[in-house]
Amino acid sequence: MRFPTNVKLLWESVDWMHGQMKRVCKSLRIPTPRTKYLDQKDKYFTYMRKRKKPWKQTTRRTRSLLHLLDKLIRELDKIEDQHRIHLRFPEKYYQKRRVIRKVLSQQHEMFTSGTHSIPDRIVSISKSYIRPIVRGKEVKKVEFGAKVNMIQVDGINFIEHLSFDAFNEGVRLIDSIWYSRSLFGKVTHISADDIYATNANRKWCTKRTIATNFKRKGKAGKYEDQRLILAAELRKERATRMEGSFGTEKQHYSLDRIKAKTEKNETLWIFFGVHTANAVRIAKRLAQEKLSQTAA
Protein backbone atom coordinates (compact mmCIF):
# COMPACT_ATOMS: atom_id res chain seq x y z
CA MET A 1 0.00 0.00 0.00
CA ARG A 2 1.31 3.45 -0.89
CA PHE A 3 2.19 5.74 2.01
CA PRO A 4 -1.05 7.65 2.63
CA THR A 5 -1.23 11.41 2.87
CA ASN A 6 -4.36 13.52 3.23
CA VAL A 7 -4.01 14.92 -0.29
CA LYS A 8 -3.53 11.45 -1.85
CA LEU A 9 -6.51 10.02 0.02
CA LEU A 10 -8.77 12.91 -0.92
CA TRP A 11 -7.72 12.72 -4.57
CA GLU A 12 -8.39 8.98 -4.73
CA SER A 13 -11.86 9.61 -3.30
CA VAL A 14 -12.50 12.45 -5.78
CA ASP A 15 -11.28 10.40 -8.73
CA TRP A 16 -13.48 7.41 -7.80
CA MET A 17 -16.56 9.58 -7.23
CA HIS A 18 -16.10 11.41 -10.53
CA GLY A 19 -15.67 8.14 -12.42
CA GLN A 20 -18.85 6.72 -10.89
CA MET A 21 -20.79 9.88 -11.69
CA LYS A 22 -19.69 9.73 -15.35
CA ARG A 23 -20.73 6.08 -15.63
CA VAL A 24 -24.12 6.73 -14.05
CA CYS A 25 -24.82 9.71 -16.30
CA LYS A 26 -23.73 7.75 -19.37
CA SER A 27 -26.04 4.83 -18.53
CA LEU A 28 -28.95 7.23 -17.89
CA ARG A 29 -28.08 9.29 -21.00
CA ILE A 30 -28.09 12.57 -19.14
CA PRO A 31 -25.43 15.31 -19.15
CA THR A 32 -22.71 15.05 -16.53
CA PRO A 33 -22.88 17.91 -13.99
CA ARG A 34 -20.16 20.52 -14.34
CA THR A 35 -17.36 20.32 -11.78
CA LYS A 36 -13.79 21.55 -11.35
CA TYR A 37 -12.47 17.99 -11.69
CA LEU A 38 -10.18 18.58 -14.69
CA ASP A 39 -8.84 21.79 -13.21
CA GLN A 40 -8.12 20.10 -9.86
CA LYS A 41 -6.57 17.13 -11.67
CA ASP A 42 -3.97 19.35 -13.34
CA LYS A 43 -3.24 21.14 -10.06
CA TYR A 44 -2.97 17.86 -8.16
CA PHE A 45 -0.41 16.33 -10.55
CA THR A 46 1.55 19.59 -10.61
CA TYR A 47 1.62 19.50 -6.83
CA MET A 48 2.63 15.82 -6.68
CA ARG A 49 5.53 16.32 -9.12
CA LYS A 50 7.18 18.74 -6.73
CA ARG A 51 9.95 17.25 -4.65
CA LYS A 52 9.28 19.61 -1.74
CA LYS A 53 5.67 20.40 -1.00
CA PRO A 54 5.24 23.69 0.90
CA TRP A 55 2.75 23.80 3.73
CA LYS A 56 0.69 26.53 2.08
CA GLN A 57 0.25 24.53 -1.15
CA THR A 58 -0.68 21.41 0.83
CA THR A 59 -3.32 23.38 2.70
CA ARG A 60 -4.63 24.84 -0.54
CA ARG A 61 -4.88 21.44 -2.22
CA THR A 62 -6.57 19.90 0.82
CA ARG A 63 -9.16 22.68 0.99
CA SER A 64 -9.93 22.46 -2.74
CA LEU A 65 -10.25 18.66 -2.73
CA LEU A 66 -12.51 18.74 0.32
CA HIS A 67 -14.81 21.18 -1.45
CA LEU A 68 -14.78 19.17 -4.69
CA LEU A 69 -15.41 15.85 -2.93
CA ASP A 70 -18.35 17.32 -1.03
CA LYS A 71 -19.83 18.63 -4.28
CA LEU A 72 -19.39 15.29 -6.09
CA ILE A 73 -21.12 13.44 -3.26
CA ARG A 74 -24.06 15.88 -3.31
CA GLU A 75 -24.38 15.77 -7.11
CA LEU A 76 -24.31 11.97 -7.22
CA ASP A 77 -26.86 11.77 -4.40
CA LYS A 78 -29.15 14.09 -6.37
CA ILE A 79 -28.84 11.97 -9.54
CA GLU A 80 -29.57 8.76 -7.61
CA ASP A 81 -32.62 10.30 -5.94
CA GLN A 82 -34.05 11.53 -9.26
CA HIS A 83 -33.49 8.19 -11.08
CA ARG A 84 -33.85 5.74 -8.23
CA ILE A 85 -36.12 3.41 -10.26
CA HIS A 86 -33.59 2.94 -13.07
CA LEU A 87 -30.47 2.45 -10.95
CA ARG A 88 -29.22 -0.77 -9.35
CA PHE A 89 -25.78 -1.03 -7.76
CA PRO A 90 -23.89 -3.91 -6.10
CA GLU A 91 -23.28 -3.84 -2.35
CA LYS A 92 -19.58 -3.00 -2.88
CA TYR A 93 -20.62 0.30 -4.46
CA TYR A 94 -22.61 1.34 -1.40
CA GLN A 95 -19.83 0.19 0.92
CA LYS A 96 -17.29 2.37 -0.85
CA ARG A 97 -19.72 5.29 -0.84
CA ARG A 98 -20.01 4.96 2.94
CA VAL A 99 -16.23 4.79 3.25
CA ILE A 100 -15.79 7.96 1.17
CA ARG A 101 -18.40 9.80 3.23
CA LYS A 102 -16.46 8.87 6.36
CA VAL A 103 -13.20 9.98 4.70
CA LEU A 104 -14.76 13.37 3.95
CA SER A 105 -16.01 13.71 7.52
CA GLN A 106 -12.65 12.74 9.05
CA GLN A 107 -10.55 14.87 6.72
CA HIS A 108 -12.82 17.87 7.23
CA GLU A 109 -12.52 17.51 11.01
CA MET A 110 -8.73 17.17 10.79
CA PHE A 111 -8.46 20.16 8.47
CA THR A 112 -10.62 22.47 10.59
CA SER A 113 -9.23 21.42 13.97
CA GLY A 114 -5.60 21.09 12.86
CA THR A 115 -5.17 17.69 14.55
CA HIS A 116 -3.13 14.86 13.03
CA SER A 117 -4.76 12.05 14.98
CA ILE A 118 -8.36 10.89 14.88
CA PRO A 119 -10.08 7.68 16.07
CA ASP A 120 -10.50 4.95 13.43
CA ARG A 121 -8.78 7.05 10.81
CA ILE A 122 -9.19 5.68 7.27
CA VAL A 123 -5.98 5.71 5.22
CA SER A 124 -7.14 3.79 2.14
CA ILE A 125 -10.54 3.71 0.42
CA SER A 126 -9.85 0.25 -1.01
CA LYS A 127 -8.73 -1.13 2.38
CA SER A 128 -10.84 0.80 4.84
CA TYR A 129 -9.97 -1.62 7.65
CA ILE A 130 -6.28 -0.62 7.65
CA ARG A 131 -5.22 1.69 10.48
CA PRO A 132 -1.91 3.54 11.05
CA ILE A 133 0.18 1.91 13.79
CA VAL A 134 2.98 3.98 15.34
CA ARG A 135 5.95 1.67 15.95
CA GLY A 136 8.68 4.23 16.67
CA LYS A 137 11.28 2.53 14.47
CA GLU A 138 14.14 4.51 12.96
CA VAL A 139 13.31 3.56 9.37
CA LYS A 140 9.51 3.30 9.63
CA LYS A 141 7.92 5.29 12.41
CA VAL A 142 4.43 4.37 11.21
CA GLU A 143 3.36 1.05 9.70
CA PHE A 144 0.12 -0.03 8.05
CA GLY A 145 -1.34 -3.50 8.29
CA ALA A 146 -2.13 -6.17 10.83
CA LYS A 147 -0.52 -6.18 14.25
CA VAL A 148 0.12 -9.67 15.64
CA ASN A 149 0.97 -10.83 19.15
CA MET A 150 2.89 -14.09 18.67
CA ILE A 151 4.07 -16.78 21.06
CA GLN A 152 6.80 -19.31 20.27
CA VAL A 153 7.20 -22.73 21.87
CA ASP A 154 10.28 -24.76 20.89
CA GLY A 155 10.69 -22.74 17.69
CA ILE A 156 7.05 -23.11 16.57
CA ASN A 157 5.03 -19.89 16.31
CA PHE A 158 1.38 -19.42 17.26
CA ILE A 159 -0.81 -16.36 16.73
CA GLU A 160 -2.24 -15.31 20.10
CA HIS A 161 -3.93 -12.09 18.93
CA LEU A 162 -4.29 -10.38 15.54
CA SER A 163 -5.84 -6.97 14.94
CA PHE A 164 -5.72 -4.23 12.31
CA ASP A 165 -6.14 -1.67 15.11
CA ALA A 166 -3.22 -0.65 17.28
CA PHE A 167 -3.04 -2.40 20.66
CA ASN A 168 -0.56 -2.65 23.51
CA GLU A 169 1.20 -6.01 23.50
CA GLY A 170 2.31 -5.53 27.12
CA VAL A 171 -1.15 -6.29 28.51
CA ARG A 172 -1.36 -9.59 26.62
CA LEU A 173 1.41 -11.49 28.42
CA ILE A 174 -0.97 -13.25 30.83
CA ASP A 175 -3.29 -14.21 27.96
CA SER A 176 -0.28 -15.54 26.04
CA ILE A 177 0.80 -17.71 28.97
CA TRP A 178 -2.72 -19.12 29.39
CA TYR A 179 -2.84 -19.81 25.65
CA SER A 180 0.48 -21.65 25.85
CA ARG A 181 -0.80 -23.64 28.85
CA SER A 182 -3.90 -24.68 26.92
CA LEU A 183 -1.66 -26.05 24.15
CA PHE A 184 1.29 -27.56 26.00
CA GLY A 185 0.57 -27.61 29.73
CA LYS A 186 2.61 -26.01 32.50
CA VAL A 187 4.81 -22.98 31.71
CA THR A 188 7.96 -22.50 33.85
CA HIS A 189 10.09 -20.09 31.78
CA ILE A 190 9.24 -17.21 29.43
CA SER A 191 11.27 -14.69 27.45
CA ALA A 192 9.65 -11.48 26.27
CA ASP A 193 10.42 -7.97 25.09
CA ASP A 194 10.87 -5.15 27.62
CA ILE A 195 7.39 -3.80 26.84
CA TYR A 196 5.94 -6.84 28.68
CA ALA A 197 7.90 -6.10 31.88
CA THR A 198 5.09 -4.25 33.65
CA ASN A 199 4.56 -4.45 37.41
CA ALA A 200 1.33 -6.41 36.93
CA ASN A 201 3.07 -8.99 34.70
CA ARG A 202 6.04 -9.27 37.09
CA LYS A 203 3.77 -9.92 40.10
CA TRP A 204 1.68 -12.45 38.18
CA CYS A 205 4.74 -14.41 37.03
CA THR A 206 6.39 -14.29 40.48
CA LYS A 207 3.23 -15.56 42.15
CA ARG A 208 3.23 -18.58 39.81
CA THR A 209 7.02 -19.15 40.00
CA ILE A 210 7.54 -18.44 36.29
CA ALA A 211 11.13 -17.43 35.48
CA THR A 212 11.48 -14.43 33.12
CA ASN A 213 14.22 -12.50 31.36
CA PHE A 214 13.05 -9.17 32.80
CA LYS A 215 15.59 -6.85 34.40
CA ARG A 216 15.39 -6.94 38.18
CA LYS A 217 13.76 -4.08 40.07
CA GLY A 218 15.00 -3.55 43.60
CA LYS A 219 17.54 -5.51 45.61
CA ALA A 220 19.14 -8.68 44.33
CA GLY A 221 17.90 -11.99 45.71
CA LYS A 222 19.74 -14.95 47.17
CA TYR A 223 20.26 -16.69 43.83
CA GLU A 224 20.94 -13.60 41.74
CA ASP A 225 23.90 -15.13 39.86
CA GLN A 226 21.84 -18.09 38.71
CA ARG A 227 18.95 -15.81 37.80
CA LEU A 228 21.21 -13.64 35.63
CA ILE A 229 22.55 -16.69 33.78
CA LEU A 230 19.02 -17.98 33.14
CA ALA A 231 17.78 -14.54 32.03
CA ALA A 232 20.72 -14.20 29.62
CA GLU A 233 19.97 -17.59 28.06
CA LEU A 234 16.28 -16.77 27.71
CA ARG A 235 17.11 -13.41 26.15
CA LYS A 236 19.53 -15.04 23.72
CA GLU A 237 16.99 -17.65 22.63
CA ARG A 238 14.37 -15.00 22.02
CA ALA A 239 16.72 -12.73 20.07
CA THR A 240 17.99 -15.51 17.80
CA ARG A 241 15.10 -17.93 17.33
CA MET A 242 11.99 -15.77 17.62
CA GLU A 243 13.23 -12.60 15.92
CA GLY A 244 14.88 -14.76 13.25
CA SER A 245 11.61 -16.60 12.59
CA PHE A 246 9.84 -13.27 11.98
CA GLY A 247 12.35 -12.37 9.29
CA THR A 248 12.04 -15.82 7.71
CA GLU A 249 8.24 -15.60 7.54
CA LYS A 250 8.36 -12.12 6.02
CA GLN A 251 11.04 -12.82 3.40
CA HIS A 252 10.30 -16.43 2.42
CA TYR A 253 6.56 -16.76 3.04
CA SER A 254 5.37 -13.44 1.54
CA LEU A 255 4.23 -11.84 4.79
CA ASP A 256 5.97 -8.60 3.80
CA ARG A 257 4.17 -8.52 0.41
CA ILE A 258 0.58 -9.40 1.23
CA LYS A 259 -1.55 -8.72 -1.85
CA ALA A 260 -4.94 -9.57 -0.37
CA LYS A 261 -7.68 -7.00 -1.00
CA THR A 262 -10.07 -7.82 1.84
CA GLU A 263 -9.70 -8.07 5.60
CA LYS A 264 -10.62 -11.77 5.75
CA ASN A 265 -8.24 -12.71 2.93
CA GLU A 266 -5.41 -10.76 4.54
CA THR A 267 -6.01 -12.51 7.87
CA LEU A 268 -6.03 -15.87 6.09
CA TRP A 269 -2.82 -14.97 4.23
CA ILE A 270 -1.06 -14.24 7.54
CA PHE A 271 -2.38 -17.45 9.11
CA PHE A 272 -1.15 -19.63 6.24
CA GLY A 273 2.21 -17.83 6.08
CA VAL A 274 2.92 -18.45 9.77
CA HIS A 275 1.77 -22.07 9.84
CA THR A 276 3.37 -22.99 6.51
CA ALA A 277 6.67 -21.89 8.03
CA ASN A 278 5.86 -24.03 11.09
CA ALA A 279 5.15 -27.04 8.88
CA VAL A 280 8.50 -26.65 7.11
CA ARG A 281 10.34 -26.43 10.45
CA ILE A 282 8.61 -29.56 11.76
CA ALA A 283 9.32 -31.45 8.50
CA LYS A 284 13.01 -30.55 8.71
CA ARG A 285 13.17 -31.75 12.31
CA LEU A 286 11.51 -35.05 11.45
CA ALA A 287 13.88 -35.57 8.53
CA GLN A 288 16.87 -34.79 10.77
CA GLU A 289 15.66 -37.23 13.44
CA LYS A 290 15.13 -39.95 10.83
CA LEU A 291 18.62 -39.33 9.43
CA SER A 292 20.11 -39.55 12.94
CA GLN A 293 18.31 -42.81 13.66
CA THR A 294 19.47 -44.26 10.35
CA ALA A 295 23.08 -43.27 11.06
CA ALA A 296 22.89 -44.81 14.52
Image: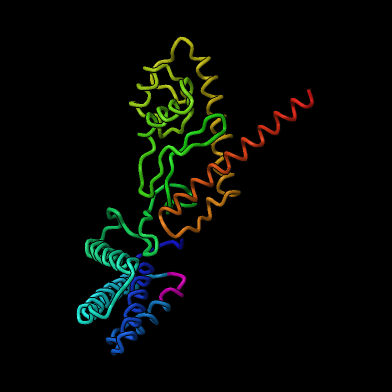
Position of residue 73 in the picture relative to residue 253 (left or right): left
Q: Is residue 89 above or below residue 109?
A: below
Q: Nearer the viewer, residue 217 or 152?
A: 152
Q: Can residue 75 be seen in this view?
A: no
Colour theme:
rainbow
Q: Residue at x 22, y 61 (%)?
A: 113
Magenta span main SS: loop
Q: Residue at x 54, y 47 (%)?
A: 273
**91 lies above or below 192:** below
The location of residue 32, given as percent across then percent down, is 30, 87
Q: What's drawn in magenta, residue-wise?
A: 47-52
Give coordinates of residue 161: x percent, y percent: 40, 40
User: Does residue 83 appear to the left or right of 272 in the view shown?
Assistant: left
Q: Which residue lies at the image location 30% right of the left edge and 67% below the top edge? A: 94
Q: Quadrant of residue 195?
A: top left
Q: Where does residue 27 sit, x and y in percent of width and height? A: 33, 84
Residue 140 rendering spot, x and y as whole percentages:
47, 52
